Image: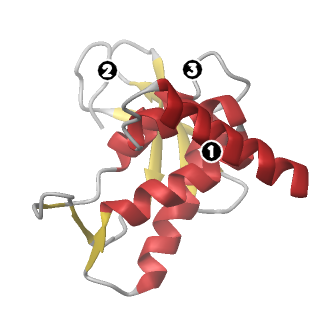
Amino acid sequence: MKCPYCGHLENRVVDSRLNKEFTITRRRRSCDACQRRFTTYERLEVTVPMLVKKDGRREPWDRHKVVSGLKKACEKRPVSMAEIEEFVDAMEIELQGLGEREISVDLIGERIMVGLRNMDEVAYVRFASVYRQFKDLGEFMDELKLMLDSGKKN
């Protein structure tokens, strides 16, 4: 592992821990050259289906893209990075479980919206406004009314 501070390739593992689900190993490392410490994370590389975009293009699943979108939606909201990471982990497991070679990005978008709605309603509305590409305030208000009406039923 290359040291992020000095670039030296020799280091030693000081401490290793598993997350709660035993899916990620966190390792504290110490560089042999500069003695600074840094953290690395190991996770099983999973094979998830190819995504079929709305215009028909295919592209591989990009975990970082999903996490980035969720971070933007949850900016300045009480949603931790741990919650976002756990949600994306669960989503990857769900996608693997489908057993499909390709899936529509619509399935991903809808799944994200369900998850965000459970995490934080403001983040949900932020994401929905971009994902659904509201053209005017009326469409935005319709979505809010749907959300409020379904909240009353629960």
Q: Which mark is residue 4?
A: 2
Is 23 situated left or right of 149 in this image? left
- Tell me the kind of residue under disc 1: Leu
Q: Residue at x 68, y 48 (%)?
A: 146
Q: Which mark is residue 116?
A: 1
Colour scheme employed for the rendering of this structure: secondary structure
Q: Which comes sooner in the sequence, label 2 or label 1?
A: 2
- Tell me the kind of residue under disc 2: Pro
Is 131 situated left or right of 21 in this image? left
- In the displayed structure, 102 sits above or below 86; it is below
- In the displayed structure, 143 sits above or below 23; it is above
Q: Residue at x 66, y 29 (%)?
A: 122
User: What is the C-alpha distance between the residues marked 3 and 1?
Assistant: 12 Å
Q: Residue at x 37, y 24 (%)?
A: 32
Q: Secondary structure at mark 3?
A: loop
- In the displayed structure, 76 sits above or below 84; it is above
- In the displayed structure, 56 sits above or below 6; it is below
Q: Nearer the viewer, residue 57 or 11?
A: 57
Crowdedness of circle 1 by 10 Å Cα count: few (<14), some, many (20+)?
many
Crowdedness of circle 2 by 10 Å Cα count: few (<14), some, many (20+)?
few
- Tell me the kind of residue under disc 3: Glu
> Residue 144, position in %: x, y?
66, 37
Q: Which mark is residue 18?
A: none
